Amino acid sequence: MAISAVLLAYKEAENLRILLPKIKQQLENTGEEHEIIIIDTMRPLDNTPDVCKEFGAKYVNQRLPNFGGAFITGIQEAQFDKFLIMDSDGSHNPVYIRDIYKKFIKGADVIIGSRYVKGGKTNDSKTSIVMSHILNFVFRIITGIKAKDISTDFRMYDTKQLKAVELTCKNYDILQEVLLKMKINNRKLVVKETPIVFEKRLYGESKRQLFKFILGYIKTLFMLIGVRINAGINKNVKK
């Protein structure tokens, strides 16, 4: 029983220098063996490799492009049965690792660090909050996942189930794709939430491009509808 903690980085060396010792401490507090894996860009754009070496984190360059490619690389690299993923910009406070871990071991396949359950909060812009609520409402219907916050990536997964899904999305929409495909593989998938406060990033600027972000989700909307319909047809055929 052990934890693979994965952070996806894009010029986040300054933030990782602050986050890594805090993450390491929280993981040690679980009492489980653990590894910390930093998935960096295809080639280094800052001194992230040096920061990883300083704090004992495993440094890996992503093998596929974009956020989705980094996520898939992280899944491939994880060795342990629990897969923890969080942002590397400081918006996800490591202090919540304890709550996510405790809820996971009580019985769940996925735990989401949620901004929108009781006790949760986000310090994002008003525009982003409105868009996020709309996004979550739509994708709750499409995926059948009843969690309130399925657009955040502060999560702990059962690694075996995570590795069993084939992911194709290239951007942040992979966060909805993975939940739907895990549910297709496991009709009894247990997804729970625990409250977090989503903070503003520590250093640097956001890498998200609003227009590209919206366009990507519109395409994914129809793709996931097709995936769910096809899964339903295949289930009926097997019967």
Image (cartoon, grey):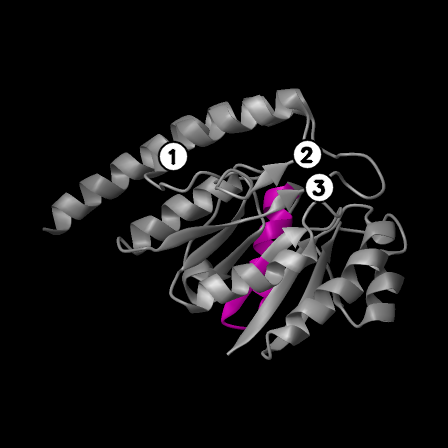
Q: State the residue in front, 85 or 224.
A: 85
Residue range of the region highlighted in magenta in the rendering? 67-84
Query: Which residue position holds label 3?
Result: 199
Asked whether residue 8 is in view, the answer is yes
The residue under the point 38% across, 34% down is: 140
Tell me, yes or no, whether the highlighted magenta stretch contains residue 82. yes
The residue under the point 75% across, 46% down is: 89
For badge 3, the amino acid type reads: Glu
Q: Are marks 2 and 3 in contact (CB under 8 Å)?
A: yes
The residue under the point 89% across, 63% down is: 50
Q: Please tell me whether residue 231 is drawn above or below residue 50 in the rendered image.
A: above
The residue under the point 79% across, 72% down is: 56
Disc 3 vs disc 1: which is toward the camera? Answer: 3
For badge 2, the amino acid type reads: Asn
Q: Is residue 214 left or right of residue 111?
A: right
On the image, the x and y values in percent for residue 75 come to 56, 60
On the image, the x and y values in percent for residue 87 come to 68, 49
Query: Which residue position holds label 1?
Result: 140
Q: Please tell me whether residue 48 is drawn above or below residue 139 in the rendered image.
A: below
Give the CA separation, mark 3 to mark 1.
Answer: 24 Å
Asked whether residue 79 is in view, the answer is no
For badge 1, the amino acid type reads: Arg
Disc 2 vs disc 1: which is toward the camera? Answer: 2
Number of the label disc, if any, that sits on residue 123: 2
